[in-house]
Amino acid sequence: MRKKQPERVSEAVNRKRDQITKNLRTDAVPSEYNEALQIMEDYLRSQKKRCTVERRFILQALYQLSSPVDIYTLHKIVCADEGSVALTTVYNTLDLLVQLKLANRLELVSRGMTFFERTLGQEPHGFVICEQCGTIKVLRKLQVLQKFETQLPKGFLPEAYTLQIHGLCAKCQRANAKKKNK
Ligand SMILES: [Zn+2]
């Protein structure tokens, strides 16, 4: 079966993405990384495939990030740290991680940008997204999300849920007001 190729995006989307990921924070490797690596290695072994260093780098980079990342940015991060890695490898590895439930695929912004985040070790969280500049803030310790769990149908086991609040950030509102007054 042929794999899908990474989506092509416009210049405007590229610019927006660069802005979003400008302030991406890299944390220390969390303890869940080892668990995720074990799951990926076990799966690949069962498929008689090798767990290449590239795959390991990609998994580690994803698990070090504190906010969702798109494939191109993750590609940049991995290449900056580890030298040349093919974009297709990043794409295929993310596909595999989603399949193994080690990563979540998120549609946070319109116009064809897909984001990924690690799943292991994540508490329920939400996102605040500025529709103008694309800034994404992760909201943690959301009591409202934890409350949802008490209202689920009996015996239902939640695997993933997200809350997304779309709007305009303070900076964009100020910029818009300035433009209007000119
Ligand atoms: Zn904004």
Image: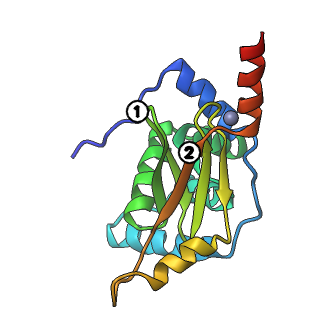
Query: Where does label 2 land, which residue?
Result: 166
**Residue, disc 1:** 7
**Which residue lies most toward the front here?**
181
Which quadrant of the figure has residue 74? top right
The residue most toward the bottom is: 155
Quick check: is the Cβ at mark 1 less than 8 Å away from ligand 1?
no
Q: Indicate whether 1 appears above or below 31.
A: above
Q: Earlier in the sequence, mark 2 or mark 1?
A: 1
Q: Amino acid at mark 2?
A: His
Please give the name of the residue rendered at 53% of the width and 42% of the height, measured from the top-left corner: 71
Secondary element type, mark 1: loop
Marks 2 and 1: CB-CB under 8 Å? no
Please report the residue visible at 51 percent of the width from the left and 38 percent of the height from the top.
Answer: 86
Q: With 163 as the anchor, is 101 left or right in this view? A: left
Q: Is residue 55 left or right of residue 157?
A: right
* Rendering quarter of residue 135: top right
